[in-house]
Amino acid sequence: MLKMAVLLSGSGRTLDNFHERIQKGTLHAEVQVVISNVADALGLTKAENYGYPAFHAAGNEAINTILKKYDIDVIALAGFLKLYHPPTELIRSVINIHPSLIPSFCGDGFYGSKVHKALKKRGCLVSGCTVHFANEVYDEGPIIYQKSVDLDYEDSPDDIATKVFAAECEAFPEALNRVDAKGINFFWDRVKG
């Protein structure tokens, strides 16, 4: 079972999903701590209500100081909107979800609604999400799991966002379960080259 830290910046919808699935026994993880770079993030209130230790920490150094107090296997970026630099011992343990099928519509500047607007502008008929390990470059770490969604010609960026978030709710827990089953190194080693 993975021991997980959750980093977030907003409402905590992904934390809600994790908590619900942990309670059902379909996500093989335990949330050890929740940290937000936004002091009044709703996700922190939710974390406290779920009984998880919850903290505000503005930058990497403050986040990493908090993490040292917990036994952590992975750090899940759950709507964390800053480039995060983990402590050395967790450098290969940071997992992110991106709202497109990498390598499309990813990298610096592609996040949230910007991704869905770019998809709409290009006329894409398929989107989805990618769960991947994070490294020092946006959206370039090893891919753990991808889930696609079909789009309709009439879909607005908001419609696309809704479809992709539904896929994210399935994909992120599945990816975490795969990391629990196969180990972190499996995913890093499979893309060496």
Image (cartoon, helix red, strand yellow):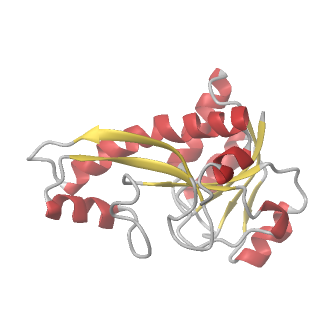
Task: Report the residue that reaches farthest toward the front.
Answer: 193
* Residue occupying the point 15% across, 64% down: 121
Viewport quadrant of the C terminus: bottom right
Please tell me in which quadrant of the rendered image residue 78 appears. bottom right
Please tell me in which quadrant of the rendered image residue 174 appears. top right
Give percent across and percent down for residue 100. 36, 54
Foreground pick, 78 / 95: 95
Viewed as shown, does residue 156 lie left or right of 105? left
Give percent across and percent down for residue 141. 57, 61
Viewed as shown, does residue 146 lie left or right of 25? left
Foreground pick, 51 / 84: 84
Viewport quadrant of the N terminus: top right
Q: Is residue 1 above or below residue 128?
A: above
Give percent across and percent down for residue 109. 40, 75
* Residue occupying the point 50% across, 64% down: 139
* Residue occupying the point 47% across, 34% down: 170
Please tell me in which quadrant of the rendered image residue 168 appears. top left
Give percent across and percent down for residue 9. 56, 64
* Residue occupying the point 67% across, 40% down: 179
Viewed as shown, does residue 4 lie left or right of 193? right
Q: Is residue 170 above or below residue 23?
A: below
